[in-house]
Structure formats: C-alpha cells, structure tokens
Amino acid sequence: MRLEGKRIAVLVADLYQEMEVWYPLLRFREDGAKTVAVGDAAGKTYTSKKGYPVVSDKSIAEVSAADLDAVIVPGGWAPDALRQDERVLKLVREMDKAGKIVAAICHAGWVLCSADIVRGRKATCFKAIKDDMIHAGAQYVDEEVVVDGNLITSRVPTDLPAFCREVAKALAAKAAAQTSGSRS
C-alpha cells in the first residue's frame, strides 16, 4: 500500500519497546508516509528498555491533530510517562474526536485509558494492563489486532505485522474516501 502524503506521529519517551517504535517508523516511511518521532522535546534522545536510542524529530508542542493522519503509541514503559503529559492526552483525544487514526500497542493502552477514549469500545492490549483497560470502559478482546472505528490496538511485538497492516489499510481507506469525495 502506498501512503504518500500521509503524516504519522510515533510518540516516544524513555523505556520504549524497541520494535514498537522502529517497526512502524520504518514500515510507514517505506510506504511513502512522512513519519516522525514525537517526544516532549525536539532533538532529544530517548532510550529504549534495552538502551537503544531514538531521536525525536518534533516536540509534542509542535504537532496537532490538524497536522496528522495517524498517531501511534508504542509500548514498553514509555506509556507510563506519556500518559502523564497532558499535551499527549490532548493530542490523542483530538485525533480520536476528529476520526483520525489512533493506534496503540502493548502497554500503550495506558495512554488511551488516561485520554478516556476507550469507554464502550473494543480494544486489546498487553495482558498486564487488561484490567486497566476494562476499568476505563473498554470491551477487552484478546486478539492480535482489534479495529474499532478509528481506534486500532494490538497486544505484543509479534502482533506488529497485523497492527501495521490495519493502520495502513485504514490510512488507504481514508485516502480513497477523500479522493472519491473530492470528485463528487
């Protein structure tokens, strides 16, 4: 699937899960999307759970829902820091309200809970935060990827192929809908 012109933010903070940041960043770049790592500061180096670095392209203050087609929240322990940043929660809420893609994998469900966007929706996550998702109102499903409207969730790094495939499908579907709508 070609995703030229699509803009995707991958949120980053220290102790992120390596594959859950790098796989989507590189996968969607390969498909032609403009993917950026977004942290609390631009140009800052964040280290993964195993010490692997990623440098943020932009700060959370520099991005808005109007500038993006999708936001991806990776797991690891980074979501615990991300959910404490009101700017992150605001971005996730605004993306969701606008019907834009909000994708979260593993412990990233914490961010969705704190943003209060899972109530009444089907979602999955890493099993250790299943109760958090349920208490936030999600209808928990134990599947490799769950799509509920614009919300796409997965459980673990081995789910990344299905997770990214659904994100790409959703982006392509939105592009097709916009193209056919502009011809009407």
Image: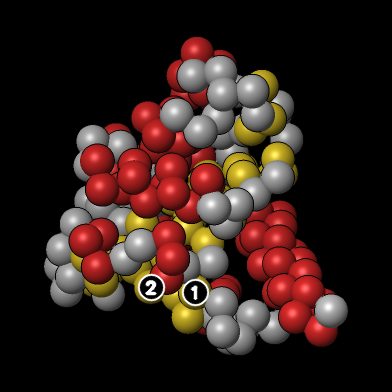
Residue drawn at x 49%, y 19% as measured from the top left: 136
Q: Amino acid at mark 2?
A: Val
Q: Which image quarter is the N terminus in?
A: bottom right
Quarter residue 122 falls in: top right
Q: Is residue 131 left or right of residue 91?
A: right
User: At 55% across and 30% down in the image, what residue appears?
Assistant: 118
Instruction: Between residue 26 and residue 170, name the one nearer to us.
Output: 170
The relative height of residue 120 versus residue 161 in the rendered view (above or below) is above
Residue 114 lies, in percent from the top left, at: 37, 30
Q: Which one is in front, 42 or 21?
A: 42
Q: Residue 87: x and y, percent?
A: 26, 48
Q: Amino acid at mark 1?
A: Arg
Look at mark 1 in the image and give the residue it sits on.
7
Say whether residue 137 is visible. Answer: yes
**Residue placed most toward the observer, 172 or 93:** 93
Real-space CA distance between mark 1 and mark 2, rounded to the nearest whole angstrom: 8 Å
* Residue 127 image position (x, y, % from top left): 55, 25
Q: Residue at x 25, y 68 (%)?
A: 62
The percent coordinates of residue 94 (x first, y second) are 44, 49
Q: Which residue is mark 2?
A: 36
Q: Is residue 169 above or below residue 82?
A: below
SS at badge 2: strand
